[in-house]
Amino acid sequence: MSRTLASLEYKGYVSRGPSARDGRSVEFALTPKAEHALARDPLRIVATDIEQATDGNVAKLLDGLRRTLRNSIARNNGRAFGACLSCWHFRVRVRLSSRTPHHCSLLDEPLSEADSRTICVEQEPAAAA
């Protein structure tokens, strides 16, 4: 935890100061840079969309989830999400390590069998052969 806080402080996301209660312990506070990053957090935006879409009504929830998905796709410049294994950047059986048989050439990341079936926001459909 201390390394995480030190890293966040170094990057300018938290500030350190003496505790107002006893002056001996340390308190951390979010900086304006952190507040700005949180305001742009895609998951927070999606959570807000869901909150606005629901009030306990299942039909409204489904409609709200559809609207949330449309909003997410719009924020992604119209690109829908898709599974890694159907992506243009997916490389089959490229053994970069003994544990990961596949590879994402866009992110330069090794992918396991399980990873290959996950949904990725960066997914670009592979051209039909």
Image (cartoon, rainbow, N blue to C red):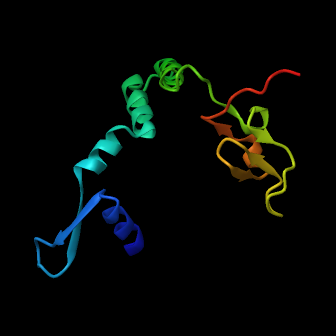
Q: Is residue 32 positioned above or below 40 on the image? A: below
What residue lies at 64% left-to-right and 37% top-to-bottom? 120
Q: Quadrant of residue 78?
A: top right
Query: In what quadrant of the picture does the C terminus appear?
Result: top right
Q: Is residue 113 visible?
A: no
Q: Residue furthest bottom?
A: 24
Q: Is residue 123 above or below residue 12?
A: above
Q: Is residue 28 shown left or right of residue 61?
A: left
Q: Going by the image, does 47 lie left or right of 89?
A: left
Residue at coordinates 17% horizontally, 70% vertically from top-left? 17
Quadrant of image for the N terminus: bottom left
Residue 72: give x, y in percent of width and height: 50, 26
Q: Nearer the viewer, residue 111 or 60?
A: 111
Residue 77 drawn at (x, y percent): 52, 22
The residue at the point 50 percent across, 20 percent down is: 74
Q: Is residue 15 left or right of residue 84?
A: left
Residue 6 x %, y % = 35, 70
Q: Position of residue 26 (x, y in %)?
A: 21, 74
The mark tally for this picture is 0
Would you place residue 16 above or below residue 66 in this image? below
Q: Is residue 128 left or right of residue 3?
A: right
Q: Tell me if I can see residue 108 in this picture.
A: yes
Nearer to us in this view, 96 or 17: 96
Which residue shows up at 11% across the image and 79% down it? 22
Q: Quadrant of residue 21?
A: bottom left
Q: Quadrant of residue 18?
A: bottom left
